[in-house]
Amino acid sequence: MSKSKRLLDLMMTVNRKRKFTVRELADEFGVSARTILRDLQELGELGVPLYSEVGPHGGYQVLNERILPPIAFTEEEAVAIFFASHALRHYQYLPFKEASLSAQHKFYNCMSGDIRDRIDEMKHRIDFVTPARQGEFPYLSILLEAATGSRVIRISYRSKGGETKRYIQPIGLYASDGIWYCPAYCFLREGIRVFRCDRMMSAEYRADAPLPLDLSGIHLETLRDEGRLSGGPEQAELHLKVMLTAEGAQRCEGEPWAARLLVRVPDGAGRLEGGIARRDLHFFAQYIIGLCHEAVVQEPPELVEEIRRILAGLMSKYS
């Protein structure tokens, strides 16, 4: 085995292992311990963060900030990966913003000149627009860390009812229209809730936090399939049926909660149909008013009354 191939294989091996000894690596690669020591020294000079401990239980270990081995990309793959990262630049807050920018710069600078020229030209030809939001999302990192580590955190949350402190066990993070949301198990409400991250005033680990639950079977995909990522009601008390024109159906496709209730018909029109909670009538009424002539409510009558109430209030302002 050539030295260059051995170094590459060694880099992949030490990244995979949590802890190892020189003798283990020497036996695995079929070389002397002195050769492995020289190879490890070269890996350290290349930036692999190795840490050594002496003694009968000592050895080497790779620090948490591991270095990935070189990966060969085609030109199309390199461009696709660059723009996948480039698309996030409109988000002022990301759970990994600094790491994303650092990776993007490294990736760009390692490309050949002709590929960089192509990317520079494409920057002005393609974009992924995200609405600008004034809200702040400073706790995305701890929320994502808690979600991946199955940990419980205490948050201070601001809602229409005021500010409350509660323990939550985050399930994940997702962004919609420039706003970050965190579905989580809420120990105060004893159920899964969707929290707006810009309404979190604080987020911290606490020694007196409840023990985490086993939520290994619950993730963003399962919640999306159940239609719960929109923060929808747990109990459907009313039946919704709204007839839509083709334009109305197309506009509803852009709303996660509406897309779940949307039924399309062959001519392009459709309807919103499904169960809703009584407490969400005001939200649905405002949305239907925004669709204007593209929607007609058939059920429930309570929604029709709520629309009339809102429109009457608007008329009084402009009479």
Image (cartoon, helix red, strand yellow):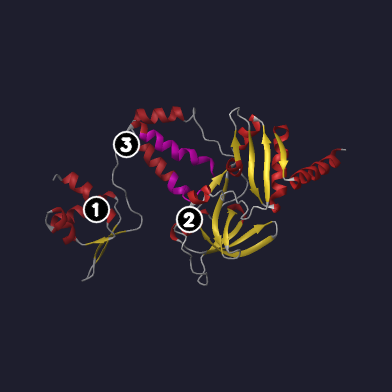
Q: Nearer the viewer, residue 294 or 208?
A: 294
**Tag 2: residue type?**
Ile
Task: Decide if residue 77 is in sight here.
Answer: yes
Element at label 1: helix
Q: Position of residue 47 (x, y in %)?
A: 30, 51
Q: Position of residue 217 (x, y in %)?
A: 45, 57
- Magenta stretch containing residue 99, yes or no? yes
The residue wearing badge 1 is: 13
Which comes before the other along the chain, label 2 or label 1? 1
For the point 18% across and 48% down, the residue is 6
Alpha-carbon distance for marks 3 and 2? 34 Å
* Mark 3 neighbour class, 10 Å CA radius: few under 14, some 14 to 19, many 20 or more: few
In magenta, the rendered stretch is: 77-100
Q: Position of residue 73 (x, y in %)?
A: 32, 36
**Tag 1: residue type?**
Thr
* Mark 2 neighbour class, 10 Å CA radius: few under 14, some 14 to 19, many 20 or more: few
Of the two numbered discs 3 and 2 in the rendering, the one whose residue sits closer to the viewer: 2
Whether residues under marks 2 and 1 lie with C-beta atoms below 8 angstroms apart, the answer is no
Q: Is residue 264 left or right of residue 69?
A: right
For the point 45% across and 28% down, the residue is 122
The residue wearing badge 2 is: 218
Q: Nearer the viewer, residue 163 or 182?
A: 182
Element at label 3: loop
Which comes before the other along the chain, label 3 or label 2? 3
Which comes before the other along the chain, label 1 or label 3? 1
Whether residues under marks 1 and 3 lie with C-beta atoms below 8 angstroms apart, the answer is no
Q: Position of residue 133 (x, y in %)?
A: 61, 44
- Magenta stretch containing residue 282, yes or no? no
Alpha-carbon distance for marks 1 and 3? 21 Å
The residue wearing badge 3 is: 73
